[in-house]
Image (spheres, grey):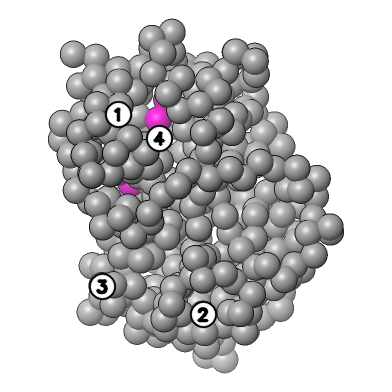
């Protein structure tokens, strides 16, 4: 399992995560630091253990500010893909090692809630988050909306020549031009692939499997993690991908990578990227403080400005938000997220065993 520990003390921030870990698909090959992962705390301080799939830039933006407001809380962060978080929390159910799960698809959180992996907690802002963006029993809340779009290298492809919709990706002219972040470990990619199956015919997944086989035929490589995806895209080893809007904009605007995006004409799967407290968390008070901090209105505005996040709270003043947000097309594919949560394991297992790497044969 790809993962990494990062530890913030009261005096310093040790940013030890690889550049470009995605909001729903992070992960690298580092091993956990020896940092007392038993859920205990040092004398005179609290501890908070977070499992996250958030991008490095997001973590580096948020954690120091949380520490500034809560100097008595020692924070440890383990970063990995959203699906890997699910597997780890599930495996640790009898003895939870994390307190807070930061970042994952609604399908993941629906499954985790149904398996009894999340604590019920009704935050102070609960009434401002629409019902479709949270759990009815307060076991998870959506922090932001995350459109999944078509990504391309803007130095290699002109915007007018880039694919305009999902089906355009199947054109033979894009053969060996497409790079895909390893699907099974990534909540982002699992959701995109599930959505592609659903949009064909949810009652007959074979139609979706056939679509994915054609995409596989044009796919040059499935990269190990987002970092490799960005490196290979920048070097034009591939020039197209499918990815989430936030991380594309972070790479384009903050990392100055030659990336841009096309919002698919037929609509995008829009993830509700969520958070929740792990069932049986050893540091419940610290977890609740972090929960409230993430949804603070000033934090949401700043995250929109600096990190391109679309908040789920409806009581924010959108006129104070940046132009990229106010001008964004948010046409959504019509998806039944309960069906996606129910079928995800089955569909992705079939893809992995019968489609991946076989489209060219």
Number of the front mark, 4 or 1: 1
Residue at image mark 4: 181
Residue at image mark 1: 212
Compute the Cα span from label 4 to label 2. 31 Å
Q: Is residue 266 left or right of residue 112?
A: right
Residue at image mark 3: 115
Query: Sequence order check: which comes first, mark 4 or mark 3?
Result: 3
Compute the Cα span from label 2 to label 3. 20 Å
Q: Which residues are magenta?
A: 179-185
Query: Sequence order check: which comes first, mark 1 or mark 2?
Result: 1
Q: Is residue 314 visible?
A: yes
Q: Identify which residue, 207 or 5, lies in the foreground.
A: 207
Which of the labelled discs sits on residue 287, or is there none? 2
Q: Residue furthest right?
A: 320
Q: Identify which residue, 52 or 360, lies in the foreground.
A: 360
What residue appears at the point 70 percent right and 31 percent down from the top-left corner?
Answer: 256
What residue appears at the point 59 percent right and 29 percent down from the top-left corner?
Answer: 262
Query: Residue 4, located in which quarter of the rendered image?
Result: bottom left
Q: In the rendered structure, are the residues bearing label 4 and label 3 in contact, judged by CB atoms less than 8 Å apart?
A: no
Q: Quick one: SS at disc 1?
A: helix
Number of the front mark, 1 or 2: 1
Compute the Cα span from label 4 to label 1. 15 Å
């Amino acid at each position: 399992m790809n993962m990494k520990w990062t530890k913030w003390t009261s005096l310093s921030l040790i940013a030890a995560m690889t550049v470009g870990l995605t909001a729903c698909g992070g992960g690298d090959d580092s091993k956990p630091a020896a940092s007392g992962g038993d859920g205990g705390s040092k004398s005179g301080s609290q501890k908070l253990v977070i499992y996250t799939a958030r991008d490095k830039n997001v973590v580096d933006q948020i954690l120091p500010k949380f520490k500034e407001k809560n100097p008595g809380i020692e924070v440890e962060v383990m970063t990995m893909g959203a699906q890997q978080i699910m597997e780890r929390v599930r495996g640790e159910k009898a003895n939870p090692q994390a307190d807070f799960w930061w970042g994952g698809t609604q399908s993941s959180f629906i499954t985790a809630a149904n398996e009894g992996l999340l604590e019920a907690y009704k935050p102070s802002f609960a009434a401002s988050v629409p019902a479709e963006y949270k759990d009815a029993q307060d076991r998870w809340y959506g922090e932001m909306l995350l459109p999944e779009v078509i990504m391309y290298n803007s130095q290699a492809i002109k915007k007018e020549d880039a694919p305009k919709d999902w089906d355009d990706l199947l054109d033979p002219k894009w053969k060996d031009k497409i790079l895909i972040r390893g699907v099974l470990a990534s909540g982002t990619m699992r959701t995109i692939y599930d959505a592609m199956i659903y949009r064909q015919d949810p009652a007959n997944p074979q139609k979706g499997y056939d679509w994915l086989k054609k995409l596989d035929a044009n796919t040059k490589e499935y990269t190990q993690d987002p970092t490799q995806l960005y490196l290979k895209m920048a070097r034009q080893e591939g020039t197209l991908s499918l990815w989430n809007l936030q991380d594309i904009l972070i790479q384009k605007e903050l990392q100055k990578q030659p990336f841009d995006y096309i919002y698919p004409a037929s609509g995008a799967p829009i993830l509700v990227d969520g958070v929740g407290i792990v069932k049986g968390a050893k540091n419940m008070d610290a977890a609740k403080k972090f929960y409230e901090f993430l949804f603070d209105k000033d934090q949401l505005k700043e995250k929109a400005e600096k990190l391109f996040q679309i908040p789920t709270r409806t009581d924010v003043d959108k006129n104070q938000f940046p132009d990229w947000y106010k001008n964004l097309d948010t046409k959504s594919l019509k998806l039944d997220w309960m069906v996606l949560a129910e079928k995800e394991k089955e569909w992705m297992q079939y893809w992995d065993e019968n489609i991946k790497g076989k489209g060219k044969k």
